[in-house]
Image (cartoon, rainbow, N blue to C red):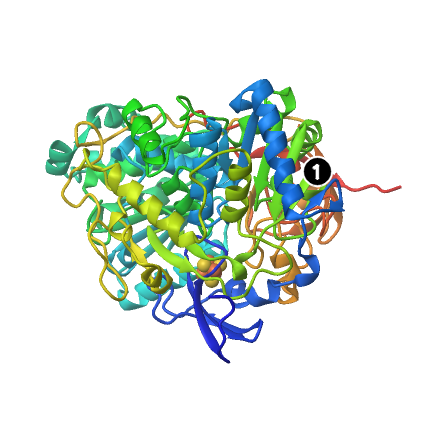
Amino acid sequence: HYPPKATNALVQSTCAYCGVGCGVDITINGEQATSLTGSPEHPANFGRLCVKGTHLLDTVDITNRLLVPEIAGEQVSWDTAISKVAGEFNKIIKQHGPDSVAFYVSGQLLTEDYYVANKLMKGYIGSANIDTNSRLCMSSAVSAYKRAFGEDVVPCDYQDLEHTDLIVLIGSNAAWTHPVLFQRMQRAKQINPACQLVVVDPRRTATAESAEQHLAINPGTDAALYNGLLNFLAEHEALDKAYINDNTQGFDEALAEASHWDMAKVSQFCGVSQAQLQDFYQLFLRSKKAISMYSMGINQSTSGVDKCHAIINVHLATGKIASLGSGPFSITGQPNAMGGREVGGLANQLAAHMDIENPAHRDLVQTFWQSPHIPTEQGAKAVDMIEQMQSGKIKAVWVMATNPLVSLPDHNQVAKAFEQCEFVVVSDCVADNDTLAYADVKLPATPWLEKNGTVTNSERRISRQRGALAPAGQAKHDWQIMSLVAQKMGFSGFDYQHPYQVFTEFAALSGYQNAGDSKRVFDMSGLARLTLAEYEQLQPVQWPIKGPIKAGVQKSARVFADGQFATVSGKAKFFAVTPQLPQQKVSKAYSLVLNSGRYRDQWHTMTRTGAASALTQHLAKPYIAVNPQDAIKLGLTEHQIAHVQSQTGELFVPVQVTDTVNFGECFMPIHWNGQFSSNATVSTLYNAVVDPISGQPELKHTGIAIEKANFA
Ligand code: SF4
């Protein structure tokens, strides 16, 4: 299919950035993509795009492409590079066992890439040491869904927004991070003026400014807010007792814990007035339908799983779940974070929503793959991986399509880990980034416009990402590169010639796993018998898809609508939540709280969006947002360079004085990497502490000290 031959040929694909998963129509002329617009019929965006999506083609920068494999900085043939990677991995595994190697992958990979990576590491190498940058994004939400519902299933759709009375956005600046979804919320409010938007966020973000109510809670206190809500609803007899009795377990314990959180206590703990709480709690009580949407502000916490449970508890207790217009709805950050979850791209999962700890699941996957191994225990999660690279337990790592030197917490320790690791392989489309600097072997991978496969968005909708251009230089697709390495390592089962073969194999596995377990929701076996032509023409489709697909855009049945969950008892579980404050506390020496997050016009570590001048026009430099009162106290003025220190590191960054952050709180965007600003990588300031269940790092709260930089 590369490249389309006709002039003005149309290729339908999916945006490469956030988890909204907007469809894009790309016009190809010759070997160039000449225009890009939103796909009018794509059910995620109906033609809309945000500023990042609109400028996708501006990021296609051939001058910063890795086009030829390299070993120790010298260009080599693919044969040589593949032999080197396979040889080193085999040697290290032979000497030190399968857990001495690891893959660190990415939500930028397509489902087909992710599946092959997971199959190679878990089924053939025999280790569960594969984790992903999605660990930093939504792993707390995954853990909570799994514990509460028995399976990692997001129970909402985007169309719920058009049918609800109340949208609570908690820990999410959707106006900047998921802009098209936010536009959809605004439109939903126009259609239904009774629909209210409440934003819970310590910062007065663009999202908060458009809300009917903004609860600027103390950082990290979200669980107490929702415990208080559960308590309030119970006191006002506004719970759905029939739903609780018929479909859930563990309610009494959850309520007992929540009942400690009366209005006065929540007000004091969360730092919002009782009148504000009363307004919010009454609004929730009055609303027949309600959605709680959340993302990193909830998940990136040392008690992120608890926070998710506090939210889910309220929805279970009110029956505001699994029906049109209601439910707890975590939004994914990356284009294929959800696809990674499906294929088992996290160190604690097996493919197709199966469990490493479950012997029957292990047996099933191993039999399906006909593989020599299957791990019996969870592997190293992202932060563990870095620790094990430092300790020497992990001796070889292969990083794919991500830049952990900038994104993982405690940058200085991450750099040491990569320096110490015996053998580092990096596959990427760009020639230069912070992590590539540590690579023994660099492998040129195809970027978004050249990749071909599928992604799944936040509402479980699978869309095709179609290769619009032929791979530049000698670049190969990630699934191809891994298949070549697997074959060279001596493994069978990797003779794929097309992503279609990978996709249909995975779809078949998703049905195979359900043969004896009808309660499980994840199933895309209806796609297992697609022909190649049907795969190429596939329109967006939401799982579960058990039967054969019909023409056009598919609509799936509402999950959990029958009140049956995937737990052993078939009932959803409440979890009692004792709200915890963040582990990285302020102290006398580091007395300001640092929050971090995305900026509207940039993406992750800027390796792609940094190339688009239109995206740097609005904001070209990093900044630290400081409240005016703090600025006066510290003698800081707008644009002045600040010296920022924490327990783990220091950086220099210009000051932005703004009352969008509260007194005592600061904010920095996450994007600036070593290429664009050599000393403003915010991860330098965060300790690598994680949620004990999900392993998700706490990247929203640490104590810092700021002073005017003195360069004398
Ligand atoms: Fe892309 Fe997300 Fe913007 Fe849609 S909202 S265009 S998926 S970045």
Query: Measured along the vertical axis of the image, is residue 543 above or below residue 251?
Result: below
Q: Is mark 1 within 8 Å of ligand 1?
A: no
Question: Number of numbered discs present?
Answer: 1
**Residue 200 coordinates in the image, percent (x, y):** 41, 46
- In the image: residue 699, left or right of residue 611: left
Disc 1 secondary structure class = helix
Residue at image coords 33%, 62%? 538
Residue at image coords 40%, 56%? 211
Assess disc 1: are there few (<14), some (14-19) or many (≥20) residues with their C-alpha within 10 Å of its C-alpha.
many
**Residue 53 coordinates in the image, percent (x, y):** 50, 64
**Residue 623 coordinates in the image, percent (x, y):** 66, 50
Q: Indicate the quadrant where residue 180 lies.
A: bottom left
Q: Indicate the quadrant where residue 556 lies.
A: bottom left
Amino acid, disc 1: Tyr
Q: Is residue 643 visible?
A: yes
- In the image: residue 203, left or right of residue 390: left
Query: Measured along the vertical axis of the image, is residue 198 above or below residue 57?
Result: above
In this view, the residue in front, 93 or 523, is 93
* Screen quadrant of the C terminus: top right
